[in-house]
Image (cartoon, rainbow, N blue to C red):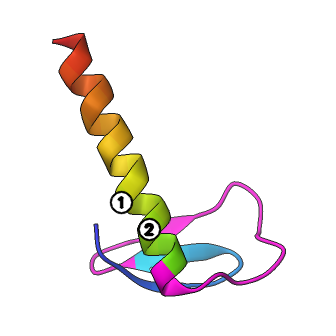
Amino acid sequence: MKIIRVTKEYFETEDEKIYFFEPLEKVISVEDMQKIMDVNEKIVKKLKDNEK
């Protein structure tokens, strides 16, 4: 998932806005948000693989 914009309320990908459960205290950089999402995707993939 490619992150293109981050605000306190949501982050935006190429095709959708995903809102945070609670607004962030400060805006984080797109690069930092991308790192978070990359790690999360790896964890989810690993969990799905372990279920099979």
Q: Quadrant of the C terminus?
A: top left
Q: Which mark is residue 3?
A: none
In which quarter of the view is residue 28 placed? bottom right
The correct choice, above or below, for 24 with respect to 21 in the image is: below
Residue stretch in magenta: 13-31
Does 24 appear in magenta? yes
The residue at which mark 1 appears reads as: 38
The correct choice, above or below, for 2 with respect to 5 in the image is: above
Q: Secondary structure at mark 1?
A: helix
> Which sits in the foreground, 39 or 14?
39
Left or right of 29, for residue 40: left
Q: Which mark is residue 35?
A: 2
- What predominant SS class does the magenta segment belong to? loop
Pointer 1: residues within 10 angstroms few (<14), some, or many (20+)?
Answer: few
- CA gap between label 1 and label 2 equals 5 Å
Q: Amino acid at mark 2?
A: Lys
> Which sits in the foreground, 21 or 26?
26
Residue at (51%, 72%) from the top-left corner? 33
Q: What is the x, y in percent for residue 24?
A: 76, 70
